[in-house]
Amino acid sequence: MPIENNKLKMKLDRKDILKALETITIAGEGKNMVESGAIANVITFGDEVVVDLVLHTPAMHIKKRAEDDIRKTILELVSPDAKIKINSKVEVPDKPEIKGKSIPGIKNIIGVASGKGGVGKSTVTANLAVSLAKMGFSVGILDADIYGPSMPIMFDVENEKPVSVTVDGKSKMKPVESYEVKILSIGFFTAPSQAVIWRGPMASKALNQMIFDADWGELDFMLVDLPPGTGDIHLSIVQSLPITGVVIVSTPQAVALADAKKGVSMFMSEAINVPVLGIIENMAYFTPEELPENKYYIFGKEGARNLSEDLGVPFLGEVPIVQSIREAGDYGRPAAMQTGSIIETVFEEITKNVVQETVNRNESLPATEAVKITTMAGCSAVKK
């Protein structure tokens, strides 16, 4: 029954209004409107009532329902003659910052990404890893290319399986080791011919297990071989791990460069804000063995170098088209291990640039949320 009001001398009571509004809630919230703070203020002027409503969601259907509930409740429980005005305002609270958990013992986590597939991102990752190991760094690779894992092939460990070890009373996976590089990949847990048909959440869960349920030990660098493009896996990685920085791999052709630009844009966006250490140009040119002085720019000339200048990010180096790089990857022995070869020299130079940009990143930018860059064995340029 409505609360009785003097018909001749109509005057609404603010306390009656608030008491009535305590009987309703906003969709999705457990507390009533008054208790939750949704009712910011109530002002009465005779038979008029002004309600200031603050919502925490911009959804129009919730706003309309809340306003309808307020009108109906005041008319039923306070006065059927009340003149109601509702001032609605939406205040969406800031989302809590997702901070990646650190992995004890891992100093630097470098993502290797590409805008599109087929540009040699995984090949570059494998050769960077062995080059770092040759320089004296302790290195690991997390093969995060869930739908196209290739590290088991490139390191000739297709038939290997991570074993279980007990660390501090907990069972953990021990990464497979090859050429002094520790590796974990979804490829270790699926048959070579088996397609991984997973939705984003399942893939993210598998990644988290390889990240946090593994005994990585002490690493100077963890390289994360990311899938091509920009999607769920990239977001899961940057939310799960404090990425030190990313390296973008691209060929010089316009199509690849357009996608590489999107990749750089994603990592440099305000929402993600992961430093881009630089761009590597793969398949930069072809030099026939019989014409060692000639360079043929099959996919275009210096496209990635020009892109790095346009975007204001470092250019880390170029990798020529050499048959032995492909053969080495197929046979499971990264080409950078070929002592005295041009490929060893090329990747040694690129790897030095990656290390230097890691140093520069440490000196000029705030440390990552969970992992601070510290001294890395084998490089005197990095300071504590």
Image: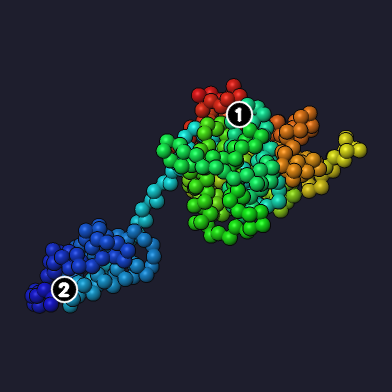
Q: Are marks 1 and 2 in contact (CB under 8 Å)?
A: no
Is disc 1 placed on a helix, strand or loop?
loop
Tell me where residue 337 appears, x and y as whole percent.
73, 33
Give the side of residue 69 with respect to residue 220, left or right: left
Task: Give the residue drawn at x 68%, y 41%.
Answer: 155
The dot on residue 127 is none
Determine the residue located farthest toward the right in the rendered image.
290
Number of the front mark, 1 or 2: 1
Query: The residue under label 2 is which amino acid type?
Result: Leu
Question: In this figure, which residue is indicated by the disc labeled 1?
Answer: 137
The answer to which quarter of the image holds residue 287 is top right
Say if 80 sits above or below 217 in the image.
Answer: below
Question: In this figure, which residue is indicated by the disc labeled 2?
Answer: 77
Task: Give the residue drawn at x 74%, y 45%.
Answer: 330
Say if 23 sits above or below 115 in the image.
Answer: below
Query: The residue under label 1 is which amino acid type?
Result: Phe
Say if 220 sits above or below 330 in the image.
Answer: above
Q: CA distance from mark 1 to mark 2?
A: 74 Å
Tell me where residue 107 appears, x and y as whole percent.
52, 32
Between disc 1 and disc 2, whose residue precedes? 2
Q: Residues within 10 Å of mark 1 (few under 14, many from 20)?
A: many
Return the residue nearer the eye: 35 or 211.
211
Give the side of residue 2 with respect to residue 91, left or right: left
